[in-house]
Image (cartoon, grey):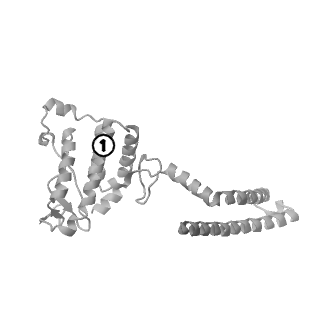
């Protein structure tokens, strides 16, 4: 069930993650950014701890009926309870209706995961006046950022939000193995190609290929639909240029394999 929900909500959680990353980058150094980052770190620590629960703790109950029929319910161990309490204190302090309940759910075929629930306003015990609570429910960016962290954690997609390994800016990874956002990944790729000699070799090859390919394209454009638009000499030239273009392509593929092999050997000797 949850894997199907992830497929349906994929565009939605990616959009929320992109928005949250943009907020964290814009608000860097502010009190709001520090609080959202702290909440992110607490949820990530909680998610790391959840992997141990199914292996070490037996379930205390099983859901009967409803959309979660058959889901296993686990009691929260002391180590995990401390993390959930810290998260709940952060949420309550900032007047949000999100709270982690005293139980964890593992649906059929899924790992144990956290699910922060949304409570009605009277259920939140924040120790402040009602007027202050009502003022806390403004739909500003800060509230939206907190809500995005909670929702991404509920969908088990918070791990996609990460800092770039190159510039340390936040981004939402479209692949789980991505460690750089697109701009930094492109820069690193260009640096690696330049360091390996691939970029220089490609430019030399491309200049030769461009001369051949441009002439071939001009003859093909002149030929049009019927070959009679070309003279006998031009048709022979076009045939030679086509063969030469293919030969240059094969030559570059061979050169590229050689450069990559040298690079791999060099890296392996370090």
Q: Within the image, what quadrant is residue 64 found in?
A: bottom left
Q: Position of residue 179 (x, y in %)?
A: 44, 55
**Residue at (57%, 57%) from the top-left corner?**
192
Q: Position of residue 229 (x, y in %)?
A: 83, 59
Q: Position of residue 123 (x, y in %)?
A: 12, 43
Picture layout, residue 129 above or below residue 53: above
Q: Nearer the viewer, residue 131 or 239?
A: 131
Q: Secondary structure at mark 1?
A: helix
Task: Bin the neighbour count of mark 1 within 10 Å (Cα to Cα): few under 14, some 14-19, many 20 and up.
Answer: many
Q: Is residue 28 left or right of residue 90?
A: right
Q: Which residue is mark 1?
A: 36
Q: Nearer the viewer, residue 155 or 223?
A: 155
Q: Within the image, what quadrant is residue 65 found in?
A: bottom left
**Residue at (71%, 58%) from the top-left corner?**
206
Q: Can residue 64 be seen from the camera position used here?
A: no
Picture layout, residue 13 above or below residue 231: above
Q: Can residue 202 be seen from the camera position used here?
A: yes
Q: Is residue 165 left or right of residue 150?
A: right
Point out the image quarter for the N terminus: bottom left
**Residue at (78%, 64%) from the top-left corner?**
241
Q: Nearer the viewer, residue 80 or 147?
A: 80
Taking the view exactly as shown, the residue that stands out farthest to the front is: 270
Picture layout, residue 153 above or below residue 139: below
Q: Position of residue 137 (x, y in %)?
A: 23, 35
């Amino acid at each position: 069930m949850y894997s199907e929900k992830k497929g349906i909500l994929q565009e939605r959680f990616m959009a929320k993650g992109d928005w949250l990353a943009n907020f964290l980058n814009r608000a860097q150094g502010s009190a709001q950014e520090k609080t959202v980052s702290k909440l992110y770190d607490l949820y990530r620590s909680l998610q790391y701890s959840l992997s141990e629960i199914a292996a070490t703790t037996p379930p205390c109950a099983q859901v009967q009926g409803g959309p979660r029929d058959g889901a296993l319910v686990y009691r929260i161990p002391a180590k995990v309870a401390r993390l959930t309490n810290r998260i709940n204190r952060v949420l309550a302090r900032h007047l949000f209706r999100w709270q982690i309940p005293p139980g964890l759910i593992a649906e059929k075929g899924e790992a144990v995961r956290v699910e922060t629930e949304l409570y009605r306003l009277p259920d939140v015990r924040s120790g402040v006046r009602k007027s202050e609570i009502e003022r806390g429910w403004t739909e500003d960016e800060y509230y939206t950022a907190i809500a995005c962290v909670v929702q991404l954690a509920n969908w088990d997609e918070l791990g996609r939000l990460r800092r770039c390994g190159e510039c340390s800016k936040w981004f939402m990874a479209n692949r789980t193995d991505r460690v750089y956002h697109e701009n930094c990944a492109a820069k690193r790729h260009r640096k690696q190609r330049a360091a390996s000699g691939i970029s220089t070799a490609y430019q030399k090859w491309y200049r030769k290929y461009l001369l051949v390919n441009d002439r071939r394209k001009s003859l093909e454009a002149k030929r049009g639909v019927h070959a009679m638009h070309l003279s006998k000499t031009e048709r022979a030239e076009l045939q030679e240029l086509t063969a030469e273009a293919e030969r240059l392509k094969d030559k570059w593929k061979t050169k590229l394999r050689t450069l990559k092999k040298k690079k791999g050997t060099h890296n392996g000797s370090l």
